[in-house]
Image (cartoon, rainbow, N blue to C red):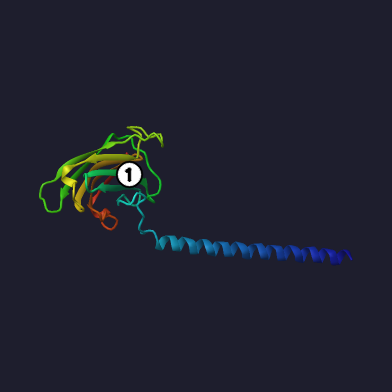
Amino acid sequence: MMKLQNTFVMWAAILTVIFVQSGCEKKGANRSEQESTHERHTHHEHTAPHGGTLVVLGEEFAHVEFVLEETTGKLTAYVLDGEAEKPIRLTEKTIGLNVKRLNSEKARTLQLKAVANVLTGETEGDTSQFEGQSDELAGVTEFHAEIASIVVKGQTFTHVDFNFPEGNEGQHEEHEEHHEH
């Protein structure tokens, strides 16, 4: 009887190991499948949370979303994470843009100023939102712009070109300079 009981315990242990091992292999296979799916979608499009135009900084390091009020020429910029979902606060008080209407040869500088927000606790010098107004942009639906320089999480991005309303998702690597601090 004791020998039968030991044999039973031994087989139960063996089957448990086999069962657990096969479960781990399936999880591993699933993980590899998820990783390859992620790799296929690495260069994916993001959705602008405020309905604006997304400009990517670096290799999906961060985004700046631009929203234009066409009637007034007011331009709002929201600094967002690499997935364009969460705000990133900056210490900068302004973001400089060189803006050129598509039918004009002359670029104009537009300073977007930091915006405080009582609801989020953001203050000038600790905010993710910047605004500026330009009569040049009033009534315009398309323009070319360049972010002169922006520092996000210790990394500086300069000469970031984009077209509004297209953004730069497909072209950002070719035109911007990026420096770590």
In the picture, the quarter occupied by the N terminus is bottom right
Q: Quarter of the image holding residue 126?
A: top left
Residue at 15%, 53% in the rendered image: 102
Whole-percent x, y for residue 159 in the image: 22, 46
Amino acid type indicated by mark 1: Tyr
Secondary structure found at label 1:
strand
Residue sitting farthest toward the front = 71
Q: Is residue 42 left or right of residue 2?
A: left
Q: Residue at x 22, y 40 (%)?
A: 133
Residue pointed to by mark 1: 78
State the residue lying farthest toward the left. Answer: 105
Give above or below for 10 relative to 73. below
The quarter in which the C terminus is drawn is: top left
The answer to which of 148 and 102 lies nearer the viewer is 102
**Image location (x, y in percent) of residue 106:** 10, 47
Q: Provide residue 42's location: percent of width, then percent of height.
A: 38, 58
Residue furthest top as drawn: 124
Q: Residue at x 74, y 62 (%)?
A: 13
Residue closest to the eye, 13 or 132 = 132
**Could you say which quadrant of the image residue 93 lies in?**
top left
Tally of numbered tags:
1
